[in-house]
């Protein structure tokens, strides 16, 4: 993204930037929740396949009745009525996750000219150390604009007013 891609469009208020930052943080939390659903899906599937081994070992140990119970009562069982885990993931994606992503994208498009992560970009500018090679404004770019006298130089904003410990994070 070019330099302007992370600059606040003219007319976008502090309140709008903060609100979009909060919406973005909520979406990121949803992304984590979705990841946990995939972990649930994979772990449950792994457990189901491990049951095959348990059935074999129970049979080999002479416990045919227990082997048959595990095979018929647990192997391939629905995790909730009518659903395997992949169906839960698909329903979550269709019902909640996609709607969340679409609404967040539309809000950024309409309220901030499509410029996402404005809150984080401004937080980065407020928190980075000017002229430090590990604190450049963007990847692979020397930080020329941070030097006094450069036409784009701006004093370091006070970050204490822009974020609380539980505010949006990037």
Image (cartoon, rainbow, N blue to C red):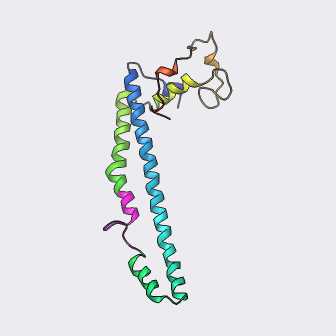
Q: Residue at x 43, y 85 (%)?
A: 68
Taking 12 as reference, is 155 left or right? right
Q: How many marks?
A: 0
Observer-nearest of 74 and 156 = 74
Name the residue rendered at 53%, 25% in the picture.
3
113 sits left or right of 50 in the view: left
Q: Is residue 38 above or below residue 82?
A: above
Residue shown at the point (49%, 27%) measured from the top left: 6
Give the main secondary structure, helix, strand or loop, of the magenta stretch.
loop
Q: Residue furthest top?
A: 149
> Does 75 appear in magenta?
no
Q: Nearer the viewer, residue 18 or 131?
A: 18
The percent coordinates of residue 144 (x first, y second) are: 64, 19
Coordinates of residue 153 in the picture (x, y in percent): 58, 14
Whether 77 is among the magenta residues is yes
Residue 129 shown left or right of residue 103 in the figure? right
The stretch in magenta equals 76-90
Residue 100 screen position, x and y as percent = 35, 43
Residue 83's place in the image compared with 69, above or below, is above
Relative to 104, does residue 85 appear above or below in the rendering?
Answer: below
Q: In the rendering, at what x and y percent does residue 40 appear?
A: 45, 60
Left or right of 41, for residue 136: right
């Amino acid at each position: 993204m070019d330099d302007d891609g992370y600059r606040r469009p003219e007319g976008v208020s502090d309140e709008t930037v903060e609100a979009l930052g909060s919406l973005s943080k909520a979406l990121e939390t949803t992304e984590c929740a979705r990841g946990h659903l995939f972990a649930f899906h994979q772990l449950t599937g792994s457990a189901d396949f491990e049951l095959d081994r348990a059935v074999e070992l129970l049979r080999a140990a002479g416990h045919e009745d227990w082997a048959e119970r595990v095979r018929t009562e647990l192997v391939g069982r629905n995790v909730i009525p009518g659903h395997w885990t992949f169906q839960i993931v698909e329903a979550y994606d269709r019902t909640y996750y996609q709607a969340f992503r679409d609404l967040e994208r539309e809000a950024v498009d309409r309220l901030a000219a499509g410029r996402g992560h404005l809150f984080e970009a401004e937080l980065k500018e407020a928190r980075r150390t000017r002229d430090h090679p590990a604190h450049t404004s963007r990847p692979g770019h020397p930080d020329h604009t941070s030097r006094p006298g450069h036409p784009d130089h701006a004093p370091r904003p006070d970050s204490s007013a822009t974020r609380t410990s539980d505010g949006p994070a990037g």
